[in-house]
Structure formats: structure tokens, C-alpha cells
Image: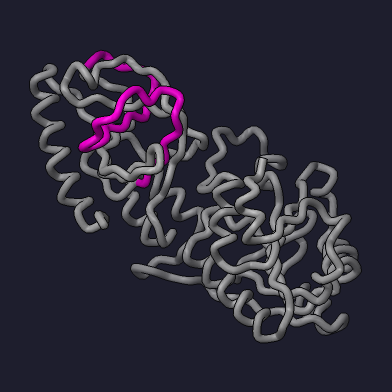
Amino acid sequence: MIKEGIRRFMRIIEGTDRIPPEFAGAFITIGNFDGIHLGHRYILQKLVGEAARAKRKSLLITFVPHPKMILHPERRPFYLLTTLEEKLTLLSAEGLDAVILIPFTLAYAETTAEAFIMDFLWQKLRVGKVFIGHDYTFGKDKQGNEAMLATFGKKLGFEVEVIKAVATDNQIVSSTGIRKAIQEGNVKTAASHLGRPYNVQGDIIKGMGRGAGLGFPTANIKPHKELLPATGVYAALANLEGARYQAVVNIGVNPTFGGVPLSLEVHLLDYSGGDIYGESMEIFFIDRLREECCFSGPGALIAQIKKDVKRARAMLKPYLS
């Protein structure tokens, strides 16, 4: 379910059968846009800016679910940087006039690149200009590319602009690279490529209660997406009940206590509220403090947690308003 608040800032068109006539001649971009990272945002800024100057609508076309989830269901877990709601929320902040969500099915995967251009981009949209990333492919068997688009554009009368890759810290920004950094626990690099800290939202569930016994109560989180940073301890910010807190986050199996299934536990610094079971929490990973360790006993673990909290406060100080 797409929140109505998103729709107030940006029109969301579901499917390709009922595209409003005012979007004829729109300037568009096409892609999965997982993460809405710095490279994506550069494309979007170009699109929105040029569309406004040309007095055209700006339109992003994407697919739901991600095509790889349909084409390769055997690849589990399937890691995405953003849920659909998160992606639409981020897109709405970029000034787009609309997003078209195309349902991706095995039948739709048979659409050839030529049919996509002729039947959709031209017949239904009469597209004015297409902005694509430097490595974008589309259509059955990835037949479509920038050269094909340019050829059809010259014949039909629309422009095509290929946007070069964006680099930061001498690294090309890509969704694949960001996923890899997160899986390695390098959340600081991920944040520099995303343009914001990587976030995970989830529901607070009952845990073992060991944190409270140690003097550091934790909220156990059932995350809404599968991509989590590598096991370890992190300095983070957390949104809960409309307030933001500094936090120390542990992702791991609690080896000091014999090991459990992988858990995501959040200790909120300076929190004095009551029972929060069933509430939703959003975590923003700022930096990695250390690897998960097996300690000799509770006393050694408590001493380390105190050090973690002290380091986390120092890391998080620049983020306090």
C-alpha cells in the first residue's frame, strides 16, 4: 500500500493503460533506481531541470517488483536497498511530476526492446526526451541499449541523453557497490554513495531480555527488508515515536551466551520511555564500532558495551541538532 502522503507531492501511475494525456511529450528516465543514490539523483536533477525549462512533465518509469525477483527467484535472500515505499518517498523529494509503476511479470519479460520503444514510449507517451544511465539495458534478453534508443529517437523525433557514471572517493557509485559495502559492514562508505545513512525500518518484538539484565536494555527489531549490515556493533541514529535517539546497534548471534539466530538489537541512549513492543523503529547506520565478539562472561561484555556507548556518542555528536 502506497501512502497517500507520497501521492500529494508526486503523481503515481500504476500500469501503462491509463496514462493521463498531460504526460504526452514528457521527459523521462527508466530504471530500477534501487537506493536512489548519488548517481540516480544526478540523473533525476538533470531530468527535472531540463523538463522544467522545456515546460514538459518529468516522469520516471520503473518496475514492480524488481525484475530480478521474477527472473531469478532462486536467488534468495534478494537484497534491495529500498522498499517500494522508501523509494517513492525519496523520489517525491526530487521534484518529479510522476512515477509510472509497471507490473513486472514473466509475460512482461517477453517484451522486446523494440516493442517497449514503439508501443509504450512512442505510441502511449510520445516521449520528448529520454535520460538513461551509461550502462542501462532493457527489453527481452537485454536487447535494448543507448544505441538502439538513439536510433529510434532520430527516426521518431525524441532526444536521448546518456548520463555518465558518478564517482565519489574515486569509486563509481552503483547500487551493486553499495550493497557490497553494507554486507561488508562498511556503512560509512555506503552512506557517502547514497548521500544519506543506510536505513532499516522494522517492528519491535520481544527478545531474550538479556540486555536489560546487563543494564543496557535493547529493542529487538524484525526488519522490513533483508539487506542488513555485516554482523557487528554500530553507532546509529534511531527514530521512535516521532523522536530521534542516539543508539548502539548489535547485529549478530550473541556468542557470549551460546549463540542464537541472527538478531538486530538496538540500545537507545538516553531513552526513558516505557514499553515499546509492537512499535515501529527506523535505524540509520552511521559507522561500525567493532566486530561481534565472544567475551569471557557478562562482566567483560558490560565493560565493552560501556566503551561502545562512549565511542558511539563521540561519532554521533556531529549529527545532533
In the picture, measured across the screen, residue 71 lies left or right of residue 173, that is: right
Residue under the image location 56 percent in, 66 percent down: 94
Q: Nearer the viewer, residue 289 or 220?
A: 220
Depth order, front residue of 271/264: 271
Question: In the image, which residues are magenta?
Answer: 257-284
**Number of dots carrying numbers:** 0
Relative to 61, does residue 166 appear above or below in the rendering? Answer: below
Q: What is the quadrant of residue 90 in the picture?
A: bottom right
Residue located 38% across and 38% down the image: 240
Please state the horizontal and vertical placement of residue 28, each as a whole percent of the image. Answer: 71, 70
Q: Position of residue 271 (x, y in %)?
A: 25, 34
Q: Seen in the image, is 100 located left or right of residue 136?
A: right
Residue 43 colored in magenta in the image = no
* Residue in the foreground of this view, choosing between 299 and 174: 299
**Above or below, comparing residue 212 to residue 224 in the picture:** above
Image location (x, y in percent) of residue 186: 33, 49
Left or right for 181, reference 297: right
Q: Residue at x 35, y 18 (%)?
A: 207
Where does residue 181 sit, x and y in percent of width and height?
Answer: 39, 50
Q: Quadrant of residue 301?
A: top left
Render colour scheme: one colour
Name the residue: 84% across, 58% down: 112
Look at the image and tell me in which quarter the C terminus lies: bottom left
